[in-house]
Image (cartoon, rainbow, N blue to C red):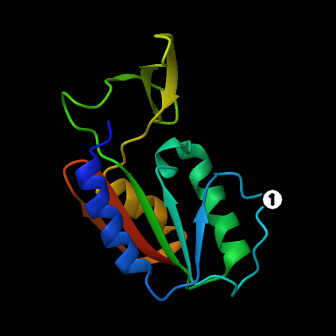
């Protein structure tokens, strides 16, 4: 569930982190069609996307990002934290450790959504393969991780 007040504060903090950078804001997890050259951007930002990327695909995604953008690019990822009693309950976990929730559309139809809630150690471990200077910040409803691509 989105907490608008806290989301505003987190986005303000992210704006400060990205100030002075040439920023690529990712709108999709599909990097195949991404038109970018190494050195074109000094930072990349993805909001709410990492939690929807299967754990088994994260290494490939980070490698593609590094190949497209080059090294030393600031990577900023933001996602939702699981908040007991407010987040949709986790319905199942697959063989890769991805978690799924059941949500409802406007017509009341139930559908399944992949929604991973990574721990700090998981973020550091996963990003450590492709990035350095990893810092994780948490608020009640959101997490932000910053790092530099290797």
Identify the residue at horizontal 23%, vertical 30% (top origin): 86
Q: Nearer the viewer, residue 56 or 18?
A: 18
**Quadrant of the rendering where the C terminus is positioned:** bottom right
Identify the residue at horizontal 64%, vertical 52% (top origin): 28
Q: Is residue 119 above or below residue 12?
A: above
Q: Nearer the viewer, residue 31 or 54?
A: 31
Left or right position of 75 against 125? right
Spot occupied by residue 50 in the image (x, y as percentages of width and height)? 50, 51
Q: Tag 1's secondary structure?
A: loop
Q: Is residue 90 above or below residue 41?
A: above
Q: Which residue is mark 1?
A: 33
Left or right position of 125 against 88? right
Left or right position of 12 against 23? left
Numbered circles on residues, count: 1
Q: Is residue 25 above or below residue 71?
A: above
**Quadrant of the rendering where the N terminus is positioned:** top left
Spot occupied by residue 130 in the image (x, y as percentages of width and height)? 55, 70
Spot occupied by residue 72 in the image (x, y as percentages of width and height)? 55, 85
Spot occupied by residue 121 in the image (x, y as percentages of width and height)? 32, 57
The quarter of the picture where residue 90 lies is: top left
Identify the residue at horizontal 47%, vertical 65% (top origin): 127
Identify the residue at horizontal 81%, vertical 59% (top origin): 33
């Amino acid at each position: 569930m989105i907490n608008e007040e806290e989301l505003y504060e987190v986005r303000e903090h992210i704006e400060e982190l990205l100030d002075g950078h040439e920023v690529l804001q990712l709108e999709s997890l599909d990097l195949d069609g991404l038109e970018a050259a190494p050195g074109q951007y000094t930072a990349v930002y993805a909001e709410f996307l990492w939690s929807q990327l299967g754990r088994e695909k994260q290494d490939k995604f980070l490698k593609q990002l590094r190949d497209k953008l080059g090294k030393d690019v600031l990577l900023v990822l933001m996602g939702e934290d699981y908040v007991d009693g407010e987040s949709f309950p986790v319905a199942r976990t697959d063989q890769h450790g991805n978690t799924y929730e059941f949500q409802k559309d406007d017509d009341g139809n139930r559908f399944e959504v992949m929604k991973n809630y990574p721990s700090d150690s998981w973020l550091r471990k996963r990003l450590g393969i492709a990035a350095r200077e990893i810092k994780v910040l948490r608020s009640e409803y959101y997490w932000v991780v910053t790092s530099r691509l290797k």
